[in-house]
Image (spheres, rainbow, N blue to C red):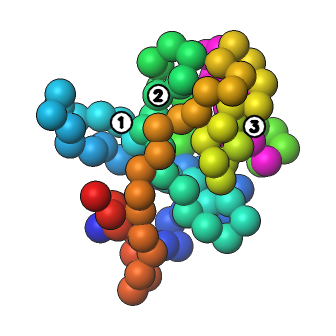
Amino acid sequence: MICKSEDVREGGDGVRFTVTRVTGEEPAFLVRFQGRVHAYLNRCAHVPVELDWLPGKFFDDSRLYVICATHGATYEPETGYCVSGPCRGARLEPLRVVERDGGVYLDE
């Protein structure tokens, strides 16, 4: 289990976690948007830096977009698609997660 479902609040702070890849541990995050949990590697599509400006602070002020604190790239939380900034048209790398029994789980 990554976290309890209640830990991922609509438009609130994201939940950071790590995933294991062949190359080692990778930072990742969860956010809830329009009732669904979405997960991505915590890596800007422009330059591979972590997105959050403080741990868990992924949303812009409107709470409608995920934003890269370093470059200002703005992403749709439900698709990871970059709608503005230096990597417009690129995407965050999604991770499959499922919500069940009050928890959020990686589904890989």
Query: Which disc is residue 27 wearing?
Result: 1
The range drawn in magenta is 64-74
71 is within the stretch colored magenta: yes
Across and down, in percent, residue 51 comes to 55, 29
Inspect this view and state whether residue 16 appears.
Answer: no
Across and down, in percent, residue 31 comes to 57, 54
Residue at 17%, 28% (x, y): give it: 23
Residue at 47%, 28% (x, y): give it: 43
Q: Which residue is mark 3?
A: 60
59, above or below 53, in the image: below
Residue at 45%, 18% (x, y): give it: 48
> Which of the two discs, 2 and 3, sits closer to the camera?
2
| Precedes in sequence: disc 2 or disc 1 | 1
Q: How many circles with numbers are drawn on the protein?
A: 3
State if disc 1 and disc 2 touch (CB < 8 Å).
yes
Are there few (<14), some (14-19), or many (20+) residues within 10 Å of tag 1? some
Are there few (<14), some (14-19), or many (20+) residues within 10 Å of tag 3? some
Tell me: 28 left or right of 55: left
